[in-house]
Amino acid sequence: MASNQYGFDFLRSEHTLSDKPPELQNVHIASTSMDEDDNEPPPAIAAAVATKPDGEKQYDVIQFLKAHRSSGDLPPSIIYKATGIDLEETDESVAKLLSNNEKIRVVQVPDPENPS
C-alpha cells in the first residue's frame, strides 16, 4: 500500500502522493461560464414541481435550505435552479409561506448594479 506524504497508510488514494510526471501535475480544466439557459432547472424537475401543492413546495425549499445551511443566504435563482420552485414569479404564494415561517430568514439584498 502506498503511503501518503504524512506517512499514514490508512488514508484513501485521493490523499496519497501522485506518481504523475511533473508536467501533468498542475493541469487544470477551465470552467465554462454560465449562460442564461443554465439558470433553468432540468425539465424533469420542472414538470414534477408543476403538480405539487404549495405546502409540499414549501417543504422542498426548506429541505434544500437545511441541506445548504453553510452556504449562507441563497438567492431565489439558486433555489429555482435546484428545486424548480420560482419564488420570484410563479410561486409567490410559496414565498409568502416561507416569509411567514419564523425559522426562515428572508433578506432583501439590493442589486449593486441598480441600487434604486
Image (cartoon, rainbow, N blue to C red):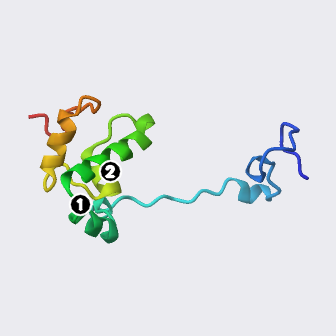
The answer to whether residue 112 is seen in the rendering is no
Tell me the crowding category of disc 1: few under 14, some 14 to 19, or many 20 or more residues within 10 angstroms, Cα based.
few
In the rendered image, residue 101, in percent from the top left (x then y), is placed at 22, 33
Instruction: State which tag comes first along the sequence, 2 or 1.
Output: 1
- Circles 2 and 1 in contact, beta carbons < 8 Å: yes
Q: Quadrant of residue 96?
A: top left
Residue sitting at x 13%, y 48%: 93
Considering the numbered disc 1 on the image, is that residue within a helix, a strand or a loop?
loop
Q: Which residue is mark 1?
A: 52
Considering the numbered disc 2 on the image, is that residue within a helix, a strand or a loop?
helix
Q: Is residue 9 above or below residue 41?
A: above
Specify whether 115 is left or right of 79.
left
Q: Which residue is mark 2?
A: 60
Q: Nearer the viewer, residue 40 or 33?
A: 40
Query: Mark 2 belongs to which amino acid?
Result: Asp
- The C terminus is located in which quarter? top left
Specify whether 70 is left or right of 88.
right
Number of dots carrying numbers = 2
Q: Is residue 47 above or below residue 70?
A: below
Q: Nearer the viewer, residue 20 or 72?
A: 72
The answer to whether residue 19 is seen in the rendering is yes
Residue situated furthest right in the rendering: 1
In the rendered image, residue 23, in percent from the top left (x then y), is placed at 74, 58
In the rendered image, residue 112, in percent from the top left (x then y), is placed at 21, 36
Residue sitting at x 26%, y 30%: 105
Q: Nearer the viewer, residue 19 or 10?
A: 10
In the rendered image, residue 66, in percent from the top left (x then y), is placed at 40, 40
Q: Quadrant of residue 86?
A: bottom left
Query: Mark 1 belongs to which amino acid?
Result: Lys
Tell me the crowding category of disc 2: few under 14, some 14 to 19, or many 20 or more residues within 10 angstroms, Cα based.
some
Marks 2/1: CA–CA distance: 10 Å
Instruction: Name the mark on residue 38.
Output: none
